[in-house]
Amino acid sequence: MYDSFNRKINYLRISVTDKCNLRCVYCMPAEGVKPMDHKEILSLEDIYEFTKTAVLFGINKVRITGGEPLVRKNIVHLISLLSSIKEITDLSMTTNATLLENMAEPLAEAGLQRINISLDTVNPDKYREITRGGDIRDVVKGIIAAQFAGLSPIKINCVIDQSPEEPDAKGVHDFCKSTGLAVRFIHRMDLESGEFSVVEGGTGGNCKICNRLRLSANGLLRPCLFSDIAYNIRELGYEEALKQAVSEKPECGTFSITNKFNSIGG
């Protein structure tokens, strides 16, 4: 399916939860945020059925996000359901990896193909500061488990303030080089002010070639991260929500008051 600017829309990012076991300083306040009502959250079957409809419209690439997707109950079962949809040729996940050590192999066996891991520093103290209590040793264990499970390529998402030449970014770069991981540098974004840029080492943030739709955990289908446009898949029905989201996808992002990184997955 093509939008009104002739961009081929084939990529669906699915946020399966707004909850996270970390409190990264650029994502949410120290006390966390008010969680979505449990009744609002899409069931695994809802997500599966919507995705089956989305592939009929040309979606063949799916990424699972959060919050932190590994805190979602029965996440391995969801991966198994999605991997059974033959039209999906690229099934991936973005995670902070702190819970990945014991889940990498089950996820791979269920059909997850590759994984992106958020890591902004390799300094244990700085990591604890950024995440407000996280233990970088858990991330390293998760990375090793993902490598053994064959989740490849493993890409590291590193948030930067200004440049990849910053000390923390250089440390992440050197770590990735020594361990055979790919690294992408993501400039810190601000949804409300509309501050974003192209991902260094990736294609995110390049509006001219954006091929994405985003489904939030409570069933809102959004054609753009930096826009408040959203379509409720329960109220409209799956097909109508997809049609409207694609037809109304803006040429370029502006800003968003309603989107939050913990609930839309960045």
Image: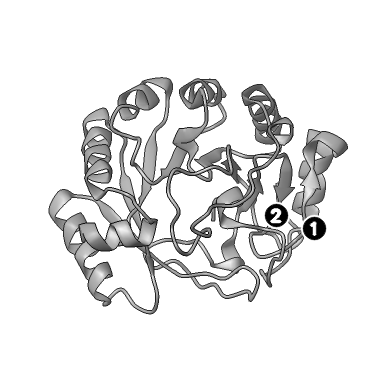
Identity of the residue drawn at 34% across and 42% down: 97
Q: Is residue 211 left or right of residue 204?
A: right
Identity of the residue drawn at 32% across and 30% down: 104
The colour scheme of the drawn protein is one colour
Q: Is residue 135 above or below residue 163?
A: above
Q: Is residue 178 left or right of residue 216?
A: left
Q: What is the x, y in percent for residue 41?
A: 68, 34
> Which of these two is toward me, 61 or 266?
266
* Residue tagged 1: 248
Q: Can you tell which mark lies on residue 223?
A: 2
Q: Are marks 1 and 2 in contact (CB under 8 Å)?
A: yes
Identity of the residue drawn at 56% across and 51% down: 262
Kind of residue at badge 2: Pro
> Which of these two is toward me, 184 or 66?
66
Q: Is residue 165 left or right of residue 84?
A: left
Q: What is the x, y in percent for residue 235?
A: 86, 37
> Which of these two is toward me, 224 or 6?
224
Instruction: Locate the C terminus by quadrant.
Output: bottom right
Q: Quadrant of residue 183?
A: bottom left
Identity of the residue drawn at 59% across and 60% down: 210
